[in-house]
Image (spheres, rainbow, N blue to C red):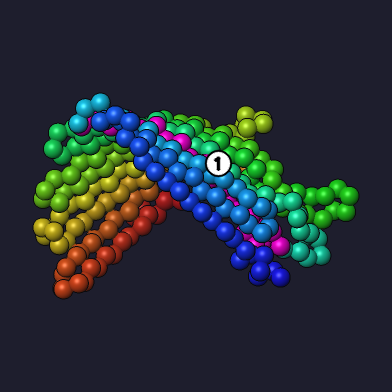
Amino acid sequence: QFQEEIDSLVAHQAQDEFQALKNLILNAGVRYDRFSTFGATVNPRAALVYQPREPTTIKFLYGQAFRAPNAYENFYETFNYKRNPGLGPETIRSYELVCEQRLGRHWRGDVSLFFNDVEDLIGLQEDPADGFFYFDNLDSVRARGGEVEVEAQWASGLHGRAGYTYTRTEDARSGLRLSNSPAHLGKVSLSVPLRRDRLFASVELQGMSRRETVRGGKVGGVWLANATLFGQELAKGLAVSASVYNLFDQR
């Protein structure tokens, strides 16, 4: 019975694209899923894409998705845990406004603003009546922020990218920032051809600002550096890569 309940899933999806104007496209879709454990869920998505001129594209994106409870959350029972037959999926609604801009032959940039609305996050709860723990849909989370990225590519194979993201993620009821959720994220990468189209060396820097811990403390910000050597077609059909992560042994 346990296996039958996990495997019982029906899903259907439909999508279409409509060109309202020469430079305006609407892409819309919907997905229907039905699980034996919690029933049906319907998730639409849509994208409105506007190109006011050839190198500029503006997009408004909406999406809705879910995460079904996994087998552990759905069925685990032991001497102090019990099953919750009413456990439902986590859901998210996301909204994003994006502006993409090509800057000459080699450069591209984009700026975006986003808002994510997460409902019914699954977490452990204690039943005061019997002291048993069970999984339930508890929390709601809001995340809002912005992102900027610049990318450059040359015919020689030289490639660079830099990006920055600001996010404020908070509990929807209390307004408090979530633990382990940095406000600032940054990434810079550079790939250099050592042998044209065959051998490349790249370095990547990833940074994040300080975070709050689950007990109310602080974890300081950190930069991590990674390096990769990548070769393709060194022999017919052969590609090889080697990487070193956290070059400077940061904690």
Residue 213 location, quadrant:
top right
Q: Is residue 73 magenta?
A: yes
Residue 175 location, quadrant:
top right
Q: Is residue 29 magenta?
A: no
Mark 1 neighbour class, 10 Å CA radius: few under 14, some 14 to 19, many 20 or more: many
Does residue 54 show up?
yes
* Percent x, y of residue 209: 45, 38
Element carrying mark 1: strand
Q: Nearer the viewer, residue 160 or 59?
A: 59
Q: Nearer the viewer, residue 64 or 156?
A: 64
* Percent x, y of residue 108: 23, 37
Which residue corresponds to the image point at 30% horizontal and 49% vertical from the top-left? 204
Type of amino acid at the residue the image marks with label 1: Ile
| Up-down relation of residue 151 to residue 83 (above or below) | above
Which residue corresponds to the image point at 34% horizontal and 50% vertical from the top-left? 225
Does residue 179 show up?
no
- Which residue range is magenta in the image? 55-75
Which residue corresponds to the image point at 16% horizontal and 70% vertical from the top-left? 234
| Up-down relation of residue 36 to residue 28 (above or below) | below
| Up-down relation of residue 116 to residue 78 (above or below) | above
Q: Is residue 180 left or right of residue 25?
A: right
Name the residue beneath numbered marker 1: 92
Give the residue at the far bottom of this rendering: 236
* Percent x, y of residue 131: 85, 53
Which residue corresponds to the image point at 37% horizontal and 54% vertical from the top-left? 246
* Percent x, y of residue 85: 75, 55
Q: Check the picture and name the quadrant holding the N terminus.
A: bottom right
Q: Is residue 124 left or right of residue 19?
A: right
Q: Is residue 4 left or right of residue 249?
A: right
Q: Nearer the viewer, residue 184 or 220?
A: 184
Give the residue at the far top of this rendering: 52
Q: Nearer the viewer, residue 11 or 185?
A: 11
